[in-house]
Image: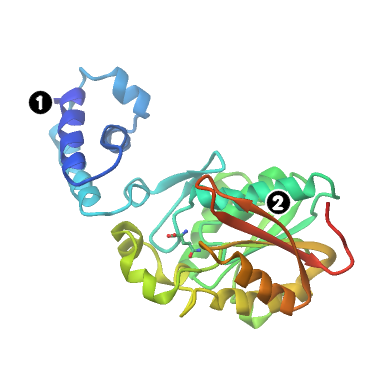
Amino acid sequence: MTSVGTAITEGMAALADAGVENPRKEARLLLGHVLKMTPAQVFARAGDDVSSDAMQVYYAQLSDRCRGMPLAHITGRREFWSLDFLVSPATLIPRPDTETVIELAEELFRKRRAPARILDLGTGSGCILLALLTVFEQATGTGMDVSAEACRIAEANALSLDLAGRAEIVMASWSDGIDGKFDLIASNPPYIPHDDIAALDVGVRDHEPASALDGGADGLDAYRSLIPVAIPALTEDGLLILEIGIGQSAAVSEIASAHGLVPGPVRRDLAGIERAVSFYKKGVGIT
Ligand code: GLN
C-alpha cells in the first residue's frame, strides 16, 4: 500500500521532470482531487494509505498533466474572483488576468449608479458575468455565447453559485444583434493574432477552444465586430469594458473612437500589461 506522503513525493518528481512549475502544490491538488480531500488535508494525512484503485487514477491524471493537459481540465474546476467555477474544454479556463475586467468595473461604478443590467459577450464559463453579479448585488445579467456546450457550463456555474435567478444564458452570436439595453457590457473576446496561436503554451494551444483565442490576422477581428453591435445595446450612460491582449490598447481605442465611443480608464494586470479598457458614449463624462 502506498501512503499519501509517498504518493505526493512520486507525483512531485514526475511533475518536476515534466517541467511543471509548482510540482508540490499540483501533486497535492491532484491527489486531493482523487481522494476528495483539500490540499491541507492531504498535507495533514501523509501517513494514511491510498488504495491501489485511487493510485491508478492518480497516475493516469499525473500522466495527463505531464503531457500538458491543464490542471483545471483534470480537476474540472478553477477559482476566479474567489468563486469556484466548473470548466470544460469548451470554454477558456478563467484566468487571473480577466479579474482586471471585474476590478475596472468595480472602480468605475464606485462613483456612479450601480449597473442594473449587465451583458457578457462570449461568456464561456460565465466567469465575467457571474463575478460581476456578485459585485453588483442588485443587478441582473445576460451571458451570450455561440457554443452550446459553453452555455451549458455557464448555466451550471450560475446554478452552483446560486446566481441562476439573476443570470440568463443565451446561445447566440453578437453578430446577429443584441436585444435589450445594458448599463455595463463586458467581454473577453478572442484576441490572439492567428499566427501566434501555434506558439502558445501547449496547455492553451491544445486544450483550450481556438474559437475563444483566435482574433484573426491582427488579433482585432472580434473588437471590430463587437464594438459596433454593443453600442446600440448600451444605455446612454452605459460602459463597455473589454479585456485586450498585449499591446492592443491603442488599436482597440482607435476602433472604438471610430464608432463614436470615448476611451475611459485602462487597468493593468499583475504583470503591468494594459489588460482591461473602458469606453463610454460621448457627452456622458467619466470620473
Ligand atoms: N489570455 C489568453 C491567453 O493568452 C487569451 C484569451 C483571449 O484570447 N481572450 O492565452
Q: Is mark 1 within 8 Å of ligand 1?
A: no
Helix, strand or loop at disc 1?
Answer: loop
Spatial CA span between label 1 and label 2: 52 Å
Q: In this view, which residue lies farthest toward the left?
A: 1
- Is residue 41 among the parts visible in the rendering? yes
Q: Badge 1: few (under 14), some or many (20 or more) residues near its Cα, within 10 Å?
A: few
Eyeballing the image, is 122 above or below 140?
Answer: below
Quickly name the residue at label 2: 105
- Is residue 180 among the parts visible in the rendering? no
Please count the marks in the image: 2
- What x and y, as percent, mark residue 128? 60, 54
Eyeballing the image, is 111 above or below 169?
Answer: above
**Marks 1,2: beta carbons within 8 A:** no
Q: In this view, which residue lies farthest toward the right?
A: 283
- What x and y, as percent, mark residue 60? 18, 47
Q: Residue at x 67, y 44 (%)?
A: 134
Quadrant position of the N terminus in the picture:
top left
| Drawn side of residue 274 relative to residue 208, left or right | right
Q: Residue at x 70, y 44 (%)?
A: 135
Q: Name the foreground residue: 54 vs 130.
A: 130
Marks 1 and 2, the one that precedes in the sequence: 1
Quickly name the residue at label 1: 1
The three-letter code of the residue at mark 1 reads Met
| Drawn side of residue 30 relative to residue 212, left or right | left
